[in-house]
Image (spheres, helix red, strand yellow):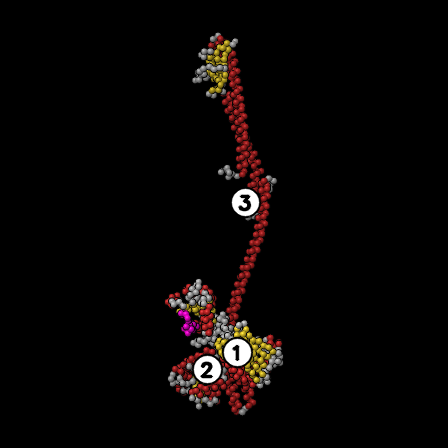
């Protein structure tokens, strides 16, 4: 049962995404801001992180950078989610160390494919 | 000289007087001389006669040596005032008797010897010698001396009369000439007055009055004719002048009006640009704000649909699908509106890359298979062998093809859709042609008119039956235009349709157009539209190949590049566009790079603009001394240039961010790339 950490500040999206992921059979941990996300990532050691980019307090880029700079959490794949969908966001995400990238509104089928791919690589 | 400068009046008077006086004097003098000469002759005759009488009377006395009788005879001369001396000489020359007028004193002068009977003028006196005879016997000689008193008195009197006469007649001549000279001088003076009036008052309407028909009269006539001509010319000149003035005034007014209009237009333009920016910002905000709830709507409805299907309530599944479908329609609409507003604002940039056409086609067909299958259509693809790679904005090419193909799928039922791709050469350029044909409902001639207009589906019933935003073809059309391509359609109602798109095999971005702003810079979000010169780089270089190379390279880095071929033009453009930064060559004809740099740095408006020297001249110290920000030696290392320009862009945009309240994402936030991908997947799910 892989654990996914969902860092997302919008309550509805957090609720909806976590429930859909649970239906898919994942165990989901949620955080509503960057700081909590960082703490949870370190304490829960999830198998994968879905990271909203525009987060309050600490931005998604920064959390990602911190996680990727830490030997303990570096191996956890991170998928960046953004509502802005800039071309540059994709490059920025890769540069920050994200393993993949998707835009909101989330195409759930496409997102779960990406999750499966990353988890499969990890195994 | 003084005489010459006298007035005509004086001159005339003077001449008249001189002439008449001279004539008078000459006449009087000659008369006087004649009179005096004849009077003298008369006097001498008279004295001779007297001598004869006295000689006769005293002849007896001398015969008888009667001296007292002779003296008495001589004394009778007392009555004759002018006779000064009378002497009777004996034949031996001795004095016999005498008479001296001045009281018996013997005069200083007496003739020393006797002469023959004669008269002579001697020392102002008239002297007469007369022989005294009696019966033919010579008794002696009589000497008479007259002082010509009568003559000199007469001469004196005559002279006085003459002087008075000359003076009186001179005076008279003066009066007469004074009166008469007016005949000549008056018209001349009148002419002079008239002339003075004309020259002082510039009044060409006055005329001199002609009094007589003489030369002066003709002079006045000539003068008047001349005045008339001048007046005529003056009138013409004045009217022309007036016209000129009126015209100048009109022109000035026109210039003023135009300036005003220009200003108004400029203000209107600024207002419009401001409004457009506000619109872009608003749309970007709306897009974000609309997407977040849409995210929830679509997500929850998908989730509910899965749950409902699992629990077996099939009748609710259809309703949930409708919610999803409506949500996605709304999302597509938002995306399309955003795309269009970006195009309209000139913010839709081109990201050129080289790609294989066949590969894109293959992906496209795979993506569209579900859409084709929905209406039981088959898709046939034919790519000609000569089609290889093209250089264009791949995302926009995809979206063009996607829009055309999905339209074909939508409007065709149980038919075939054909995609033919070929390459051709038109006017020396390679073009890639995409042709999408279907066997669907077709388009009528009337519908064709508005086919590429926004929100114009062929007719309202189509929207009801087939859905869609009505923006697909408009966006397709704009994208084709952006890449300088052509789109056309051939169709008849009920006979299917064929859309043909021709794109250059090598799309070129025009650097002079509004800059593409979806930057590759990722250190901060750029703010296109906040200020037009934000991302403009001015390249000053005399070498066209360098200009071209730099333009291409910098355009790829998402800068708007303006190039200048010489220093003068460069300076002018810098003032005009206020670029983000300037790259400057040193070796240029006429105005070299150092001069340009110096001028830029001494201009308070331009001094802030960073200048990167790009040159073969190795003199970094001089460049930096003159105020250049960086110094690159040709051939330029592209990486280094990229880092430098990027640094300046970041520096500029961060200052703008600090001082501006514009939100950090704008209309550009949604790149076409992602939009199209979203749409592809969306359709696949339908």
Q: Please state if B590 lies on the left or on the right of B19 as rendered.
A: left
Between residue B207 and residue B542, name the one nearer to us: B542
When the figure is inspected, residue B529 is found, relative to residue B374, above or below; the finding is above
User: What residue do we see at 59% from left, 46% from top?
Assistant: B225
Q: Depth check: A99 or B102 in front? A: A99
Question: Within the image, what quadrant is residue B650 found in?
Answer: bottom left
Q: Secondary structure at mark 1?
A: loop
Q: Chain of mark 1?
A: B
| Residue ranking furthest to the bottom | B312
Which contiguous range is marked in magenta? B632-649
Q: Position of residue A114 (x, y in %)?
A: 46, 85
**Crowd band around label 1 with a 10 angstrom C-alpha radius: few (<14), some (14–19), many (20+):** few
Residue B572 % position (x, y) = 46, 65
What mark, if any, has residue B196 been given in the picture? 3
Query: Within the magenta stretch, is there residue B634?
Result: yes
Query: How many other residues sit within 10 Å of disc 3, few (<14), some (14-19) or many (≥20)?
Result: few
- Residue assigned mark 2: A101
Magenta span: predominant SS is helix
Please tell me whether residue B625 belongs to the stretch shown in magenta: no
Residue B96 shows in this picture: no
Looking at the image, which residue is at 54% across and 36% down?
A: B12
The numbered mark 2 sits on a residue in which chain? Answer: A
Name the residue tied to disc 1. B386
The mark total stands at 3
SS label for mark 3 = helix
Q: Chain of mark 3?
A: B
* Residue B19 placement (x, y as % from top left): 54, 32
Which label lies toward us, 3 or 1?
1
| Residue plotted at (49% across, 10% down) | B138
Report, in whole angstroms, how far the alpha carbon at label 1 lies from the one at label 2: 36 Å
Residue located at (43% from left, 69% from top): B583
């Amino acid at each position: 049962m892989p654990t996914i950490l969902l860092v997302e500040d919008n309550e509805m999206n957090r609720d909806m995404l976590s429930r859909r992921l649970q239906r898919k059979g994942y165990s989901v941990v949620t955080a509503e801001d960057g700081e909590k996300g960082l703490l949870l990532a370190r304490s829960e050691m999830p198998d994968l992180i879905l990271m909203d980019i525009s987060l309050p307090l600490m931005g998604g880029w920064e959390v990602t950078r911190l996680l990727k700079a830490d030997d303990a959490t570096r191996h956890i794949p991170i998928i960046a989610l953004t509502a802005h969908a800039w071309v540059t966001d994709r490059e920025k995400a890769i540069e920050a160390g994200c393993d993949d990238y998707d835009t909101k509104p989330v195409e759930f089928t496409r997102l779960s494919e990406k999750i499966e791919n990353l988890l499969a690589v990890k195994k | 000289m003084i005489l010459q400068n006298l007035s005509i009046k004086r001159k005339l008077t003077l001449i008249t007087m001189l002439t008449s006086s001279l004539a008078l004097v000459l006449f009087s003098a000659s008369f006087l001389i004649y009179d005096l000469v004849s009077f003298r002759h008369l006097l001498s005759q008279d004295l001779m006669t007297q001598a004869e009488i006295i000689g006769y009377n005293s002849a007896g006395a001398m015969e008888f040596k009667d001296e007292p009788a002779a003296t008495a005879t001589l004394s009778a001369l007392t009555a004759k005032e002018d006779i000064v001396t009378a002497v009777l000489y004996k034949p031996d020359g001795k004095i016999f008797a005498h008479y001296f007028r001045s009281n018996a004193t013997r005069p200083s002068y007496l003739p020393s010897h006797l002469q023959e009977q004669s008269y002579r003028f001697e020392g102002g006196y008239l002297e007469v010698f007369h022989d005294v005879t009696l019966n033919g016997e010579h008794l002696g000689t009589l000497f008479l001396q007259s002082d010509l008193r009568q003559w000199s008195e007469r001469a004196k009197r005559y002279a006085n009369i003459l002087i008075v006469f000359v003076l009186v007649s001179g005076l008279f001549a003066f009066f007469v000439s004074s009166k008469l000279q007016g005949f000549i001088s008056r018209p001349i003076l009148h002419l002079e007055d008239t002339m003075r009036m004309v020259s002082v008052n510039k009044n060409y309407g006055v005329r001199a009055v002609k009094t007589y028909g003489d030369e002066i009269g003709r002079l006045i006539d000539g003068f008047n004719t001349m005045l008339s001509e001048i007046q005529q010319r003056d009138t013409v000149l004045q009217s022309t002048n007036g016209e000129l003035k009126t015209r100048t005034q009109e022109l000035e007014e026109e210039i003023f009006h135009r300036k005003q209009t220009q200003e108004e237009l400029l203000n209107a333009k600024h207002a419009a640009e401001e409004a457009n920016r506000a619109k872009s910002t608003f749309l970007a905000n709306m897009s974000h704000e609309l997407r977040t709830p849409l995210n929830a709507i679509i997500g929850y409805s998908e989730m509910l649909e899965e749950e409902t299907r699992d629990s077996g309530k099939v009748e609710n599944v259809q309703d949930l699908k409708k919610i999803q479908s409506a949500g996605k329609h709304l999302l597509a609409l938002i995306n399309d509106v955003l795309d269009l507003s970006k195009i309209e604002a000139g913010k839709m940039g081109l990201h050129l890359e080289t790609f294989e056409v066949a590969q894109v086609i293959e992906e496209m067909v795979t993506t569209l298979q579900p859409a084709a299958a929905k209406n039981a259509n088959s898709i046939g693809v034919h790519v000609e062998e000569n089609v290889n790679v093209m250089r264009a904005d791949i995302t926009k090419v995809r979206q063009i093809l996607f829009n055309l193909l999905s339209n074909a799928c939508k409007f065709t039922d149980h038919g075939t859709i054909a995609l033919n791709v070929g390459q051709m050469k038109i006017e020396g350029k390679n073009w890639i042609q995409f042709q999408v044909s279907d066997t669907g409902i077709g388009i009528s001639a009337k519908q064709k008119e508005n086919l590429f207009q926004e929100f114009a589906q062929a007719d309202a019933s189509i929207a009801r039956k087939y859905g869609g935003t009505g923006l697909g073809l408009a966006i397709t059309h704009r994208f084709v235009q952006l890449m300088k391509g052509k789109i056309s359609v051939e169709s008849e109602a009920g006979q299917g349709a064929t859309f043909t798109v021709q794109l250059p095999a090598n799309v070129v971005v025009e650097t002079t157009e509004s800059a593409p702003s979806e930057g590759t810079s990722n250190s901060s979000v750029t703010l296109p539209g906040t200020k037009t010169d934000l991302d403009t780089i001015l390249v000053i270089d005399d070498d066209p190949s360098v200009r071209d190379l730099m333009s291409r390279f910098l355009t790829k880095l998402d800068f708007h590049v303006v190039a200048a071929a010489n220093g003068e033009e460069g300076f002018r453009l810098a003032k005009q566009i206020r670029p983000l930064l300037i790259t400057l060559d040193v070796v240029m004809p006429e105005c070299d790079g150092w001069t340009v740099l110096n001028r830029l740095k001494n201009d308070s408006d331009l001094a802030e603009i960073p200048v990167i020297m790009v040159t073969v001249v190795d003199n970094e110290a001089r460049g930096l001394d003159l105020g250049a920000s960086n110094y690159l030696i040709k051939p330029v290392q592209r990486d280094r240039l990229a880092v430098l320009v990027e640094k300046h862009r970041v520096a500029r945009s961060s200052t703008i961010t600090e001082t501006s309240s514009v939100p950090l994402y704008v209309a550009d936030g949604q790149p076409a790339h992602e939009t199209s991908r979203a749409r592809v997947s969306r359709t696949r799910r339908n």
